[in-house]
């Protein structure tokens, strides 16, 4: 059981601490994820999202470039324990050297300003996954919250925009993973019809159990699974149980059971969203991950199924998409 987590906002938090004049780094900090806690939690790979809150910064591209610079400086300082992943083989190479792996991802397509050259430049900087939208409309499409936006027209479709389709095509050509978490439902279906390779919802749960638009309906889960994709189970209580402000391990396992029933074990992964929410949770930080495996085992998941959810399913997608 080694952990592969598709989403965390740790670097946004480190950057925010620096802005407040506080010291913070990825090796050891007071956040939910740092390298020492990852060691304890038996991590294979962490996706570090360069999350850009467009409502809290003036220039999304400038912010993401600063964050990517910080990411590389931090990773270079810790090359003794964690290695960057640019192609699939890097994961095995790092493992063979006794190191964990780190994948650079970006959450918020707006950082590209609708320009394919920026997307390609981000790829050259090491970005291997892009979340097409966050919680606002951008050049690529609309967010899951579209029905709450001013001027919303229930009679029209809010799918991918033309530029969004261009991005999907270019990302597949480059070998960058498409992430539909946060995207509108219409956008999800557009990615489904346009994408030729598997894609992911890096941090989304089942809407049938928790009726939040950030979660995926049963039909979306089935379509994602048919496409060879994976959804990363999110630990944020608001996406686990309606009205809950404390995420319990059992809440997480209930979502896994449901998704296994409707879409199959092969489409379940982890997308903790650690350092991206402020509600409480039983798995207080990433060192506690073995407790989740234990609870899954108690609930009838076999060792093979636990391995598939913890890393195998996402590794399958990475192998197919990363060139
Ligand atoms: Zn998110």
Image (spheres, rainbow, N blue to C red):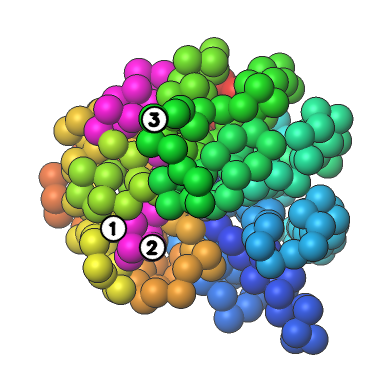
**Tag shown at residue 236:** 2
Q: Residue at x 79, y 86 (%)?
A: 21
What residue is drawn where x is 41% and y is 19%?
227
Magenta range: 218-239
Marks 1/2 in contact by CB < 8 Å: the verdict is yes
Residue 240 in the image: state x and y as whole percent.
28, 58
- Do tag 2 and tag 3 residues touch (Cβ < 8 Å)? no
Give 27 or 172, whichever is nearer the viewer. 172
Q: Earlier in the sequence, mark 1 or mark 3?
A: 3
Q: Position of residue 207 (x, y in %)?
A: 27, 45
Residue at 81% x, 32% y is 115
Residue 67 is situated, as x and y percent measured from the top left of the image, at 78, 59
Task: Decide: few, some or many residues near mark 1? Use Cα within 10 Å; few <14, some 14-19, many ≥20.
Answer: many
Tell me if residue 298 can be seen.
yes
* 231 lies above or below 43: above
| Residue 155 numbered tag | 3
State left or right for residue 120 relative to residue 167: right
Q: Which residue is mark 1?
A: 240
Q: Secondary structure at mark 3?
A: loop
- Quadrant of res 28: bottom right
């Amino acid at each position: 059981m080694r952990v592969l987590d598709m989403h965390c906002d740790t670097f946004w938090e480190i950057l925010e601490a620096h802005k407040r004049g506080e010291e913070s780094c990825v090796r050891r900090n007071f956040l939910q994820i740092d390298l020492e806690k990852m060691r304890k939690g038996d991590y294979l790979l962490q996706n570090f999202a360069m999350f850009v809150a467009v409502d809290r910064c003036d220039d999304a591209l400038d912010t993401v470039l600063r964050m990517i610079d910080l990411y590389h400086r931090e990773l270079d300082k810790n090359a003794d324990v964690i290695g960057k992943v640019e192609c699939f083989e890097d994961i095995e190479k790092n493992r063979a050297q006794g190191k964990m792996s780190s994948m650079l991802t970006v959450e918020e397509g707006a950082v590209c300003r609708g320009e394919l050259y920026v997307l390609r430049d981000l790829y050259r900087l090491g970005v291997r996954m892009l979340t097409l939208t966050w919680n606002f409309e951008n050049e690529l499409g609309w967010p899951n919250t579209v029905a709450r936006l001013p001027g919303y027209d229930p009679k029209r479709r809010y799918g991918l925009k033309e530029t969004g389709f261009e991005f999907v095509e270019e990302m597949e050509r480059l070998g960058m993973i498409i992430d539909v978490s946060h995207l509108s439902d219409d956008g999800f279906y557009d990615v489904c019809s346009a994408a030729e390779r598997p894609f992911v919802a890096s941090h989304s749960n089942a809407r049938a159990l928790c009726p939040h638009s950030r979660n995926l309906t049963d039909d979306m889960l089935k379509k994602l699974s048919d496409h060879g994709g994976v959804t990363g189970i999110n630990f944020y209580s608001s996406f686990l149980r309606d009205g809950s402000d404390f995420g319990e391990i059992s809440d997480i396992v209930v979502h896994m059971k449901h998704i296994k029933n409707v879409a199959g074990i092969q489409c379940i992964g982890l997308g903790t969203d650690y350092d991206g929410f402020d509600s409480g949770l039983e798995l207080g930080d990433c060192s506690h991950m073995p407790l989740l495996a234990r609870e899954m085992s108690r609930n009838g998941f076999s060792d093979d199924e636990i391995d598939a959810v913890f890393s195998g399913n996402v590794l399958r997608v990475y192998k197919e998409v990363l060139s």
